[in-house]
Image: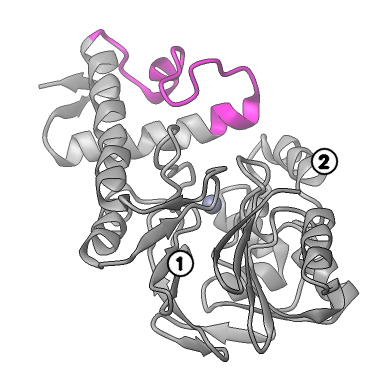
Amino acid sequence: MTQVELAEGLHVVIGGHFPKCNTLVIIDNEVVVVDPGCGIEDLRAFLMTQNLTLNDVGTVILSHIHPDHITHAVRLNRLSRCRIAANEITTPLFNDKEKMKNFLGFDRTNPVRPLWEKLVNSRMFGALEDGRVDEELQNGDKFALGNCTLRMLYTPGHLPDHMCIEILEPNLVFAADIDLTEFGPYYGHPNSSISDFKDSIRRLQHNNYRGLISGHLKEPLIEDYKTALAAYQRIIGIREDLVLAAIMDGAGSVPEITLNPIIYPSLTDPVYLQFETWMIEHHVASLLQRGLIEEKKKRYEAL
Ligand SMILES: [Zn+2]
């Protein structure tokens, strides 16, 4: 178990990269856990260092519905009887995982669904188990603890339900999957949106936080986060250039473009090919919208 103390009573238990995530733990007049994706064992080990147990967890807040962020939440609720809080979009998806699967593009007609379910079940414990959200949150809602107040900030794009959690004292933001990893922004679902993602990045850049807490970096606090966000956003543009280059080289359809994967270069797994396909589809839509390519006889051509 690795943890980083950001301020008194404010800790990040490091889960790191997918299929885990970093877990924010706030120890105040209540113990609040945001995104328990570090795993219950590491969370328990961390709490022990603070003379606490899983039973002391009062609330779990979920940033969005992705399995690597909600994993262990249902089990934690079962063990500690903590309440679970999520925003109004995440709530019905968490309570009914069939709705979650549809939301993520893995409805019953998707042939990759069984393989995706297998990946989630083997790597992200309990993420497909139906749960129950006790408290529904909305954009701007505050969550007051003794010394610290949390505020919900909707930041769609990665997924429509993605939200960051602002920690008003000491003025930090837990940015979940606006994670500043080298991989870059992830928008690999049919309802992800590149333009919403860019708007959300801009929203974070306009606010003056003391630092941004990444949901996946092993050194989670980035103080110069405005520069880091600009570099992170540039990855979207680089990918878009590569998609345009592929079309200019004669790839006229998404399957032809993904023959030489752009997002996941060493791709072999059909689940990742699905993610790649959805991301490329968003770029093709963006190129069409910007008038850089056109569709002729069901094939894309560069203009
Ligand atoms: Zn996510």
For the question of whether residue 302 can be seen, the reply is: yes
* Crowdedness near tag 2: few (<14), some (14–19) or many (≥20) residues, C-alpha within 10 Å: few
Identify the disc placed on residue 24. Answer: none
Q: Position of residue 117 (x, y in %)?
A: 75, 44
> Which quadrant would residue 255 be assigned to in this image?
top left
Q: Residue at x 46, y 87 (%)?
A: 142
Reply above or below: 16 against 81.
above
| Nearer to me, 223 or 36 | 223
In the image, the segment drawn in magenta is 249-274
Q: If you read the primary sequence from the N terminus, does the residue marked by circle 1 or circle 2 appear first?
A: 2
Q: Residue at x 44, y 77 (%)?
A: 152
Q: Position of residue 118 (x, y in %)?
A: 79, 39
Secondary structure of residue under mark 1: strand
Reply above or below: 232 against 301.
below
Quadrant of the frame with the C terminus? top left
Secondary structure of residue under mark 2: helix
Q: Position of residue 160 (x, y in %)?
A: 44, 62
For the question of whether residue 297 can be seen, the reply is: no
Which residue position is annotated with label 2?
122
The answer to whether residue 92 is left or right of residue 129 is left
Which residue position is annotated with label 1?
163
Residue type at mark 2 is: Ser
Reply above or below: 154 against 186.
below
* Crowdedness near tag 1: few (<14), some (14–19) or many (≥20) residues, C-alpha within 10 Å: many
